[in-house]
Every structure is written in C-alpha cells, then in structure tokens.
Amino acid sequence: MINLPEPQRLHGLVTATHTPFHADGSLNLPVVEKQAAFLLSKQVSTVFIGGSTGESHSLTFDERHLLAKYWMAVTKGTAMRVIVHVGANCLSDAKTLAEQAEDLGAAAIAALTPMYFKPKNVEVLVETMAQIAAMAPETPFYYYDIPLLTGVNLPMPEFLKQARDRIPTLAGIKFTNSDLMAYQYCLRADGGAWDVPFGFDEHMLGALAMGARGAVGSGFNFAAPVYTRLLAAFAQNDFATARTEQFRGVQIISLLASYGYMGAAKAVMAMLGVDVGPARLPNTTLTAAQKDKLHGELEAMGFFEWVK
C-alpha cells in the first residue's frame, strides 16, 4: 500500500470532466483548454478524466489516450492535477492505458471493474486491479467503485483488506456508492490510511458527516461554487447553510436527470460558455427546444445566480 501525504490526497472538489465532441460526435480536443481554464477560475484544481462523465465506454482506445495526452499538455505548468481513468472491459487495454498515463505524468490513475464478464468475488477483483496498477508502478492507484453502473457490488472494506498487500500503489477508492455504512468502514480501515473520495454529488453532505474529506463529481463542472460553499459551511459547523447548498445541488441534478443527465449536463456547460458538444449514443442529446426549456427552468430555479 502507498501512504499518500495529505497534499496528494483527493480532498476538496475533484471534477469528473466531460469529453468534448464536435457536432458530428468526433473528439474536439481544443475545448479541453476552455474546460481547464473554466475550472481553475472556479477554484477547482483537480480533474478526473475519462470516467463515467467522460463517456469512457463510448470512446475508442486511441481516443482515450489522446484525451489523456491533451489534458496533460494543457495543464502542464498549472496548478491542475489530472487523474486518468484507465478501466476497460478489455484488461489489456486497461493495462496499456495505465502505462501511458504514468508515462504522461498523471497524478494518479483509477479503474472501474470489467462489467460484461464480471469478477465473481473480491479476490478476482483484486487480481484484476493488481494487473492494471502494476503497469504504473510509480503512480497512485484508486479502485473506482460504482455498482449502479457496473453491476458489480462487492464489499469495499474487504477489497481494501485483500488489496493492501497485493497492490503496492493502492491509494484508496473512488467511492460512488450510497452505502454509507460500508463507507465508514473504508474510512477507518487500517487506521484511516486510505483516501476515499466520495462520488455522489447529491449525497455529499451525508458523506462529509461520516468523515469524507473530498468528493469526485460531475456536478462540479457547472456548479462548483455551490459545493465550495457547502464545504466551507460544513467546515464552520454552519449546517443550515450546508443543507441549503446541498439541496440546491439536488435540485440541479434532479432537473438535469429529467431530460437525460448526460445530454442535459453538456447543454448546461454550453450555457456557461464551455461548449463540450453533444453526448454519444446511447446517451442522448437535447434538442434545441429542450435546451431552451431547460435554460428557462434553470433560470427560474436561480441556478445562474447560484453558480456565479
């Protein structure tokens, strides 16, 4: 196991970024510069690229490598840290992406489990992740637990127990799981050695109450000020304000989900001046009429004031 020093841990807000596309669905990598600048202007200095929000399973292997290469080039010399998601159904692809991410200088890597042929138990999951992590022997590794999308729901406290001696670079878990009981066990495992950023924007305040120090979320692309205020209020024991900000996040996510979350979230980015293009099928993209309606509903909600 690797004992990450405090400054290297994924504390505060870590934005799970969108992958930008042209209108025809091809990669539009120059937009990465606008994404990075926008997030830095909102005091977000760590990104998680090529994950669920980044539509990684809708990207080719070459596109994923190009995306990582572009993010690393754009952020070189800035305060931005880049975490590269390398997980894939093909273990060989995941291992090569991990090796490339280390060569590029990524701050850390993360990997989802294969989800078509699924690991049948924790032991198999650990072996799979160990093979990926071994290709980046100098880079902190996070397992990305998101059973809602992968269909793999294995006990994460047991994963840490088995993985600590099997994965030398293991830093922790990106915990996108609503099981706050298991989350508490992970936070306390091995005397609190593990970095366990939480992955559900809409449950963030609950996770903070349980001991979370950081969060990885798609909502931070367009609503980072809401969550920054939430973190500040929680730190000051101002729970009334923290609850207000959390509910704002819930309202935003609920509204976007009613349109189809990925397409709606990308539409919101365009409204804020960072056009990341359409979503790729099977995610859907909003029509012009839907975008106009969504804009009106966001305005009525107070969204554009909340995220100034």
Image (cartoon, grey):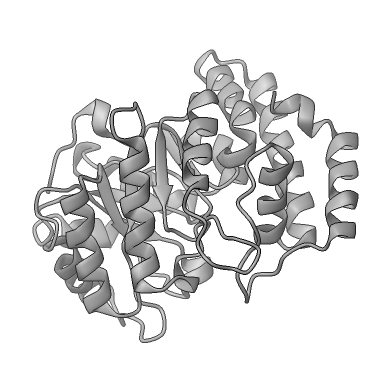
Which residue is painted at 62% across and 75% down in the image? 281
The percent position of residue 142, horizontal first and vertical second, equals 28, 53
The percent position of residue 67, horizontal first and vertical second, equals 39, 56
The percent position of residue 119, horizontal first and vertical second, equals 31, 80
Q: Which of these two is toward me, 39 or 134?
A: 39
The percent position of residue 101, horizontal first and vertical second, equals 23, 55
Residue 259 vertical position relative to residue 236 in the rendered view, above or below: below
Residue 179 vertical position relative to residue 57 in the rendered view, above or below: above
Count of residue discs: 0
Q: Which of these two is toward me, 45 or 175?
A: 45
Which residue is painted at 66% across and 44% down in the image? 269
Residue 96 vertical position relative to residue 2 in the rendered view, above or below: below
Tell me the quarter of the picture where residue 287 sits: bottom right
Residue 203 visible: yes
Q: Which of these two is toward me, 31 or 193?
A: 31
Q: Quadrant of the C terminus?
A: top right
Q: Is residue 289 left or right of residue 267?
A: right
Residue 16 visible: no
Which residue is painted at 53% across and 38% down in the image? 34
